[in-house]
Image: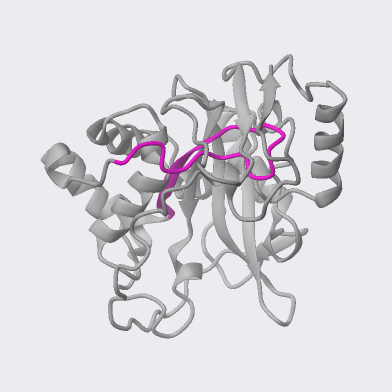
Amino acid sequence: MAAHVGKNLMAFAMIMLVFGVAVGAEQVASSPNLQCPSCRGKDYAPTPGQFNFFFLVRQWPFQFCHRPNECSIVPDESEGFTLHGLWPNLDNPCPADYPEHCDNSVFDATEIDQDVLQSMEKLWPSYSTSNECFWSHEWSCHGSCSGWNQHDYFANTISLHNNNDIAGALKDAGIVPSSEEVSTSNFLQALTNKFGYEPILFCDADRSGNRYIDSVYQCVDHQYNIIDCASVCLVHDCQPEGNKSCGDSFLYKTVQVQAGSQKSCKHAVCKQKSGTCQGGSRADSSPLLISH
């Protein structure tokens, strides 16, 4: 999510807002009357469907599962990058600019066609909890804000994933999992050549400073098109910082996975709050109206 933003940028955006300047207003026009919640009393979440763009997020499962017993299943290398989710994003001057839990619906597999569920089992697996636990979390936190019903949310996400094959695009450019580091610029260029726009890469770093690919984020508009993240990340810088940055090079590799037991489903449903009001409190007691 676009919460990886420097404090200085956030402070600047809020100062500009106080003085009546709509930062990036001419291009952030799809949600005309967003509010930053006061974080006192009732939380604010946009109406489902009111957001600027999606993040289509895929994870490299061998990085997620590299620690012993971290995962309950062994990833299938032939599936490449698997789905983490499709996340609506606002890109406004609020401290955290993504909606969560936009209604009270809960995940119901009976609302999803069987062929879509079968694809989800293969392309959107949970590596630590039950699949239904993972999908419940993704629906409650993100899908409920999409403006789609449950079948359409999961079916559209599967379609986007299949039409934008990360591992396939890399393989076409001669980049395959290896114990040798890959240049970040070459990795990005391979994906840009295939999909038209540069994605955002997130990595993990170990104590020795080695970096490992973790996730690939692509920006998607309301018509399901891959778009330039720079055109929608106008207020918050969507690029990762610190240990989540990929630096100049990183490892894109498989590892021997030592599977453990399945974890309990503790975090399937988001707390009933908006991500735009995630912790902390503002000094004022009334919301700021943001006009774009």
User: Closer to the camera, 265 or 233?
Assistant: 265
Q: Relative to residue 178, is residue 128 drawn left or right?
A: left
Q: Which colour scheme is used?
A: one colour
Measuring from the top left, give residue 193's x and y in whole percent: 61, 34
In the displayed structure, 231 sits above or below 144; it is above
| The C terminus lies in quadrant | top right
Measuring from the top left, give residue 244's x and y in whole percent: 68, 61
Measuring from the top left, give residue 19's x and y in whole percent: 88, 25
**Residue at figure coordinates x 33%, y 64% from the top left:** 76
Measuring from the top left, give residue 13's x and y in whole percent: 81, 35
In the displayed structure, 181 sits above or below 82; it is below
**Residue at figure coordinates x 47%, y 47% from the top left:** 273
Examine the structure image and report whether residue 102 is included in the region drawn in magenta.
yes
User: Closer to the camera, 204 or 6?
Assistant: 6
Q: Relative to residue 235, is residue 203 drawn left or right?
A: left
**Residue at figure coordinates x 62%, y 29% from the top left:** 35
User: Closer to the camera, 139 or 222?
Assistant: 139
Examine the structure image and report whether residue 133 is included in the region drawn in magenta.
no
Which SS type dominates the magenta stretch? loop
Residue 189, image quadrant: top right
Q: Relative to residue 117, is residue 87 drawn left or right?
A: right
Magenta-highlighted residues: 81-104
User: Closer to the camera, 41 or 208?
Assistant: 41
**Residue at figure coordinates x 32%, y 39% from the top left:** 158
Residue 181, image quadrant: bottom right
